[in-house]
Image (cartoon, rainbow, N blue to C red):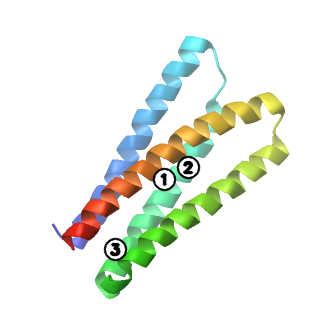
């Protein structure tokens, strides 16, 4: 499998993961009469932007600077963490206590799922390069 295909697979898998988590969020909203729209929308946007950017940068690093892949993988995890902190800080400033707790729970589910996907995907990819 080429680098282009691996990058595309990562993007497709991230989109599918977001769709599955969003469907679970909609089920939770329906079952418990919760209002999680903003938390779900922000979480999906965050994960898709970070994962698509990671895939595109991975494609560039893997083709131009293959020896830098371990540094790239570590850097992406650090960038994802710092970006998540910024998103949570902004939400803390603009929301009340109840909606903040709901947002943190929803956002952490998306964040952890994306982090697990990232770890599994790149551990397999880096061992095959």
Question: Could you tell whether 98 is left or right of 23 in the image?
Answer: right
41 vs 117: above or below: above
Could you say where residue 80 lies in the image, as x and y percent from the top left?
56, 60
Q: Quadrant of the C terminus?
A: bottom left
Picture residue at 77% right of the left edge, 51% below the top: 90
* Residue at (39% x, 42% y) in the render: 17
Q: List the residue tagged with mark 2.
A: 45
Mark 1 residue element: helix
The disc label shown at residue 48, or none: 1
| Number of callouts | 3
> Observer-nearest residue: 82 or 14?
82
Looking at the image, which is closer to me, 40 or 71?
Answer: 71
33 sits left or right of 23 in the view: right
Q: Earlier in the sequence, mark 2 or mark 3?
A: 2
Q: Quadrant of residue 92?
A: top right
Measured along the vertical axis of the image, is residue 31 above or below residue 62? Answer: above
- Residue 71 appears in the rendering: yes
The image shows residue 110 at horizontal and vertical percentages of 52, 42
Q: Local crowd at mark 2 within 10 Å, few (<14), some, or many (≥20)?
A: few
Q: Residue at x 57, y 66 (%)?
A: 79
Q: Alpha-carbon distance for marks 2 and 3? A: 21 Å
Separation of marks 2 and 1 at Cα, in angstroms: 5 Å
Residue 4 is at least partly visible in this image: no
For residue 59, which numbered disc appears in the image?
3
Across and down, in percent, residue 54 comes to 44, 66
Are the two marked residues, 1 and 3, in contact with CB atoms closer than 8 angstroms?
no
Q: Quadrant of the image for the N terminus? A: bottom left
Spatial CA span between label 1 and label 3: 16 Å
């Amino acid at each position: 499998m080429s680098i282009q295909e691996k990058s595309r697979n990562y993007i497709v898998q991230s989109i599918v993961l977001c769709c599955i988590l969003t469907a679970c969020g909609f089920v939770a909203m329906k079952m418990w009469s919760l209002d999680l729209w903003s938390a779900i929308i922000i979480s999906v946007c965050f994960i898709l932007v970070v994962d698509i950017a990671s895939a595109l940068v991975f494609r560039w690093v893997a083709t131009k600077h293959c020896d830098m892949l371990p540094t790239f993988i570590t850097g992406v995890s650090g960038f994802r963490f710092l970006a998540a902190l910024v998103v949570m800080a902004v939400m803390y400033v603009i929301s009340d206590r109840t909606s903040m707790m709901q947002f943190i729970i929803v956002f952490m589910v998306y964040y952890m799922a994306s982090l697990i996907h990232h770890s599994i995907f790149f551990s397999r990819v880096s061992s095959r390069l």
